[in-house]
Amino acid sequence: MAIEEIMTVSNGDIDVAVFERGNPNGPVLILMHGWPDTHHLWDRVAPLLADRFRVIGFDNRGAGASTVPDDVDAYRIEELAGDLFAVIDAVSPHARVHVLAHDWGSVVGWEAVVDPRAEDRIASFTSVSGPNLDQLGVWARRRLFSGSPSGIAKAARQLVASAYTVAFQVPGLPVPVLKVLAPRWAQFLSYFDGMDPSVVHTAETLPSDIVSCLKLYRANIRGRLGSPDIRSTDVPVQLIVGTGDRAVLPIVYEDAGEWASNLRRRDIAARHWSPLSHPADVARLTAEFIGDLVPAGSRAESL
């Protein structure tokens, strides 16, 4: 079934463009993308889930067909989590939904599942290559101050992997490079993630999205890592971890079980953009996780 825009969901002064495909009578599965993507990130995954699920994608604020705020504070992850809850209420007002997210979408997903509203609105959360920033802050502090050479080395490895985020904190600094990179994004992912560039499908808005959504880094990184706000969740959580992820190293999830009472981890031989490079693995693991929670023929609200 072809994807189509079904509605615009408003959250205050933000309009979120929502898209649908799949089984209109199936459990609702909401897909969330990260930087610098749009709902098109899921174009290779969604068809593999469409027979079973009512698949809902949307463009995050700042990207694609959704509102692009100017204010940095509008990109705080609690604001984006509010967009998610607004979409849930619009597309599934009477039943909980499942969430599959990548990169910053996963960061926002983590923020949503620790929100008190999650108990009644989110049935499961599958996170791909996106940590909880508060958990990441605690993980890094523990290892940096552990006195253990191996612990310090682990924290140092992730700090090196995340070095690009320092440049992203400075208004305007990375923009010239990103403007050159945007029209060559498929070639960049071929280099960075070792994937076939022909599988990279981007939105026409990428040249502006890649710049506007830098505000995600400026609005969240320093505050969340510097002063973590640790909250746990009882929503079932699955981590899909790319063993070759060079942006979010697999080691950062070592303590995740402390913050989620029902946690499953599945490793795949992929790098960061696994929804593009390994769509079958992402789709299969997501369906299996939900299937273990919701027996065949049951509805999400029966959880």
Image (cartoon, rainbow, N blue to C red):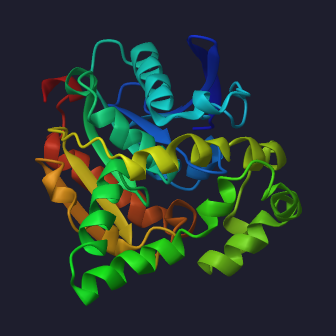
Q: Nearer the viewer, residue 44 or 127?
A: 127
In the displayed structure, does residue 257 sit left or right of residue 153?
Answer: left
User: In the displayed structure, would residue 217 be above or below residue 83?
Assistant: below
In the displayed structure, does residue 268 sit left or right of residue 167?
Answer: left
Residue 99 in sight: no
| x and y percentages locating residue 83 in the rendered image | 50, 24
| Quarter of the rendering occupied by the C terminus | top left
User: In the displayed structure, would residue 60 be above or below residue 102?
Assistant: above
Residue 186 figure quarter: bottom right
Q: Residue at x 27, y 89 (%)?
A: 149
User: In the displayed structure, would residue 164 be above or below residue 71?
Assistant: below
Residue 192 figure quarter: bottom right
| x and y percentages locating residue 219 in the rendered image | 57, 40
| x and y percentages locating residue 108 in the rendered image | 44, 40
| x and y percentages locating residue 101 in the rendered image | 44, 47
Q: Residue at x 13, y 25 (%)?
A: 302
Residue 173 in sight: yes
In the displayed structure, does residue 8 sit left or right of residue 29?
Answer: right
Q: Nearer the viewer, residue 226 or 181?
A: 226
Q: Residue at x 47, y 41 (%)?
A: 31
| Quarter of the rendering occupied by the N terminus | top right
In the displayed structure, does residue 123 sit left or right of residue 186?
Answer: left
